[in-house]
Image (cartoon, rainbow, N blue to C red):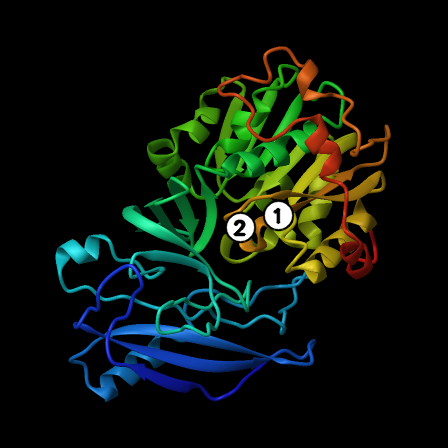
Amino acid sequence: MRASCSTIFFLPSFVSTPKPQHPLFTVICVKSNIDYHTHTHTHTFFTTYLIPTGWSWRIKRKYMEGDAGRDLGCQKTMDGKANEDIPSCCLKARAFAPDPELQANCHATVVSGWFSESRSSSDDVAKRMYFNNPMWPGEAHSLAVEKILFKEKSEYQEVLVFESTTYGKVLVLDGILQLSEKDECAYQEMIAHLPLCSIKSPKNVLVVGGGDGGVLREISRHSSVELIDICEIDKMVIDVSKKFFPELAVGFEDSRVHLHVGDAVEFIRNVPEGKYDAIIVDSSDPVGPAQELVEQPFFEMLARALRPGGVLCNMAESMWLHTHLIQDMISVCQKIFKGSVHYAWTSVPTYPSGVIGFILCSTEGPPVDFRNPVNPIEKLEGALDHQRELKFYNSQMHKAAFALPPFVRKEVKCL
């Protein structure tokens, strides 16, 4: 990757569609051209800084130069080497509010009352301001913010909760949207039931990540399950979920749940061989503390922890944006899991491109037909309305999740 010299645009005042102009700030838009070695074209990004109008140009430049290089580090590829195709940092727009009342509703990802997850250039940059994220260049998705409910840095990441206008409360980790109350059902239900409904009578289940408790809530629908281990590295995520997302955190109340707060890699390294029938990896995107969870050594440990014919379900990015990552992950899994390896997907409107995928793998042993649920949720006593009624998953959605468009099979050649 090469980044050209930046071009700086000045806007006279704070401009916003839903709010009037704000005379206290000057908007400075920095244009950067990113040339990816693996592509034939150049991507243009805009980084928007909101800077107090009274600052001198020298202070403005010093602030912007100091902001570069913070936040996201270089992402690694599956073998742990640095990936040169992804920018090494994430430049964020920062909003400064001298008024304490304004400060209470101010956050690095919130500009003029909007949360922006995906950031890139815009033809209407004066009205819509985003901050760049190297995971999703070239697009933007914004949610209207009613009120910021929580913002604090844990030992591992920044945790943000806000009330949105249309999607209810929203959880964000390190600037990346994790869930919203409105559409969390699509992700939580699918990542849990795709693997658990593919094997008969699962008993021992491990969840990696999943500190919000949603996956636990879904696993608890399966009466055959006797043990649910969960390993979450960040206790703040658990505490925040219990306070702001009780409909998800209810999963922690099940007596079968055993919580382990710590590093998942270290936890699984010490797990007895063949302990689990199913493992569900509900990690955040592969940056920060979740980076190790998409590398080959981790998948090898997961396979060792599964019984013969055991199953793994792992979050696997968007087929619209990340077919190169999906290709890498599936290639690694096919080397390790000698049963079967499949790719499925579901629709989650607040995720980049509106979809998210899953890799489903089985170890050598009794064959697993992921496409056809042998343990259908409809036949499990009390499962459909346990804790709350199922909103998204059923056996028809299960089968449909494995139907892939031609372009995916063409770009992910190992499928």
Q: Which residue is mark 2?
A: 351
Q: Are marks 2 and 1 in contact (CB under 8 Å)?
A: yes
At which x and y percent is residue 396?
72, 29
At which x and y percent is residue 343?
74, 45
Numbered tag placed on residue 136 in the rendering: none
- The answer to whether residue 273 shows anywhere in this view is no
Image label count: 2
Residue at x-position 44% and y-position 25%: 250
Q: Pick whichever, 181 or 11, lies toward us.
A: 11
Of pointers 2 and 1, the one earlier in the residue sequence: 2
Q: In the displayed structure, would residue 18 be above or below residue 29?
A: above
Residue at x-position 44% and y-position 75%: 46
Q: Secondary structure at mark 1?
A: strand
Residue at x-position 35% and y-position 52%: 144
Q: Type of residue at label 2? A: Tyr
At which x and y percent is residue 356?
61, 48
Q: Quadrant of residue 406?
A: bottom right
- The answer to whether residue 227 shows anywhere in this view is yes
Residue at x-position 29% and y-position 65%: 16
Q: Which residue is mark 1?
A: 356
Q: Type of residue at label 1? A: Ile
User: Is 164 placed left or right of 218 in the picture?
Assistant: left
Q: Pick whichever, 234 or 219, lies toward us.
A: 219
Q: In the displayed structure, would residue 227 be above or below residue 161?
A: above
Q: In the displayed structure, would residue 124 be above or below residue 344?
A: below
